Amino acid sequence: MNNRAGASEHKVRTMQTAPSIESANYQPPTWEAILAAHARIAPRIHHTPVLSSASLNAMTGAQLFFKCENLQKTGSFKIRGASNAILSLTEQEAAQGIVTQSSGNHGAAVACAAAWRRVPAWVVMPKNAPAVKAKIIEGYGGKIVFCEPTVTARKATCVRIQAETGAHLVHPYDDDRVIAGQATAAKELLEEEGDFDAVFAPVSGGGLLSGTCLGAKGIRTDVRVFGCEPGRADDAYRSLTSGTLQSLESSDTIADGLRASLAPRTFEILRRHVERILLVSEEEIISAARLVWERMKIIIEPSSAVAIAPLLKPGGVASLNLPKRADGGAPKLGVIFSGGNVDLSSLLWK
Amino acid sequence: MNNRAGASEHKVRTMQTAPSIESANYQPPTWEAILAAHARIAPRIHHTPVLSSASLNAMTGAQLFFKCENLQKTGSFKIRGASNAILSLTEQEAAQGIVTQSSGNHGAAVACAAAWRRVPAWVVMPKNAPAVKAKIIEGYGGKIVFCEPTVTARKATCVRIQAETGAHLVHPYDDDRVIAGQATAAKELLEEEGDFDAVFAPVSGGGLLSGTCLGAKGIRTDVRVFGCEPGRADDAYRSLTSGTLQSLESSDTIADGLRASLAPRTFEILRRHVERILLVSEEEIISAARLVWERMKIIIEPSSAVAIAPLLKPGGVASLNLPKRADGGAPKLGVIFSGGNVDLSSLLWK
């Protein structure tokens, strides 16, 4: 945080944190990087509980274990990646603060982790984002910078803030430090519950899902990892089935955390490690979320419900074609509930 | 309790399971009984997580640890006491099934534990109870017996069912086996988090609160135990301040799990062990419940919110007059969230 020459040097350095990659040669975060990330963030974050539900087991014919990142600090897994990136910066790199673009959970996570580091955080968000989201980010001390609601405007505004402030960019997912941080959720799940047949996570930009691949397979090589995605935001499905990176112009899915598109890093990790992408309808998302609220007494946001919705379809578990377990038991499946940030203001005790 | 000849003896015996007590000579469940209860029920119930919240700590000026019995099987702590009672019966005692009176969480717990034991459960409930509650109990395989909504009718109906079926009575709280089971929640909390200054639980019939006294003080003799009660259902407050057992004719508190009155056993335990009873208003209950939903992402029922509401009042923690901690830190307080059964049907994604 001391001894720097000028903002222009910073700008150069920080803008290099997410260099473009060459797919074939890309080296994802190593197991050692994930171990280092976990050691770095563990004192600051919650070791979230793994819950189970006899009624959901009965409904799906599986043994389900839910990693509850909805109970994580800031209400989502995003604090894992954001805090790994921000806590791993040198004093000099962190000194001018952090900048990111996010209208939701990543913005809150960056603001929170920057406050731990005692540096400012600028969060670029579209001017049509819900006021409640800006308020949450401000509650963690983040500074909101509004921009036009286009991908181009968001990137341009980030670049401008970097130039003006020398702040360090922490991209929501196209960043190895962020991916390594997100990997710690699946690592904790597999360390706690062991011999899973498969693990399920929602996919948007792919930070959580690629981290889940690395974290889960680092503990158990042959575990299968499935991505779960709204049919109305199916870029990951299209990317993996076509073999070329696709993107979404926009999406109106109720799973508001899943409207982004894969980036080069996450696409590369997913194509190497993900079994396949399971699509769900808006109705299936809503009905899964409600079921979890009612049966498990936890608040999950619709994006979390996307990860269990495929298993609740009739024949959903059977359609995965998992190999029979050696112990003859029902398939043992891990589900990552990514977050619990829902605006309750219109719902409760009216 | 074994070696019986016929159903009529059953009736006599089972009706003796909640014998009246002489206050001064009453011996509450011993630590050994609580250990035995815990060993008996642990394979069947959830070891519920203990959660914390940085924002609630900041709001109260305390270090708060929440024992989440809302995440327990059947959605409340009641399964602890009910399953301890039912699993401790001999084959003969259990053979004719179980009977109880409850319109809520205890009824569901008895139905669930009876199903584990593979014996029938009759749950006597007032005919004006919400249909959704009967449905939940039936979901666990319980048989509903409706009666007039008076204390007299409920008792008489229980006696009739006992006479007709030979079923074994498991009272919701005036039963040492039930109290010993409820004690295991505080036992787990103190085993996990150690050096609490005080523990808080809601009080209705007093099964949870008296169990909390025994479970907490069995681990840490000098921990203080506070009961938390709606002002609109203040029989425990009046009983402990007057020194004589008071009862409620009825209550309309939103904390629908807290409308019962203390019984001889629970009154006797509370007068020996509880620091004092803290009263809260309906508005304080609602606002505390909402705060927990929003900040902690868990669903608690209003009865659970009663246990944290006193701490959220301005000056609430200071008014407890707790001794300063040796380590100079903020008071370390345990809060038992008793249950999470809320009818969500009118709330969500309308």
Image (tube, coloured by chain):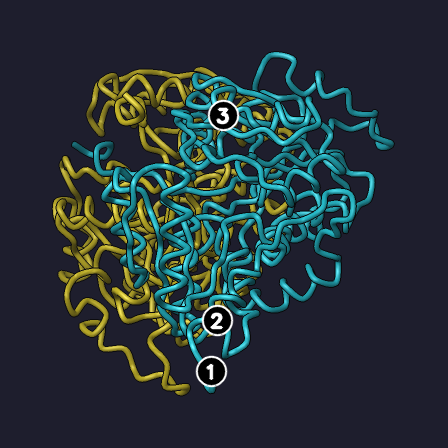
Chain colours: A cyan, B yellow
Q: Residue at x 49, y 67 (%)?
A: B218
**Chain hosting mark 2:** A
> Callout 2, which amino acid?
His
Q: CA distance from mark 1 to mark 2?
A: 8 Å
For mark 3, does the 10 Å Cα neighbourhood hold few (<14), some (14 to 19), or many (20 or more) residues?
Answer: many
For the residues carrying marks 3 and 1, which lies nearer the camera in this image?
1
Q: Which mark is residue A233?
A: 3
Which mark sits nearer the N-terminus, 2 or 3? Answer: 2
Q: Quadrant of residue B272?
A: bottom left
Q: Which mark is residue A4?
A: 1
SS type, badge 1? loop
Question: In the rendered view, does B162 fall on the left or right side of B37?
Answer: left
Q: Position of residue B46 (x, y in %)?
A: 56, 44
Q: Is residue B279 visible?
A: yes
Which mark sits nearer the N-terminus, 1 or 2? Answer: 1
> Callout 3, which amino acid?
Ala
Q: Which residue is mark 2?
A: A10
Q: Position of residue B313 (x, y in %)?
A: 17, 61
The answer to whether the residues at label 1 and label 2 have Cβ atoms under 8 Å apart is yes
Q: CA distance from mark 2 to mark 3?
A: 36 Å
Q: Nearer the viewer, residue A76 or A101?
A: A101
Q: Nearer the viewer, residue B62 or A148?
A: A148
Q: Are marks 2 and 3 on the same chain?
A: yes
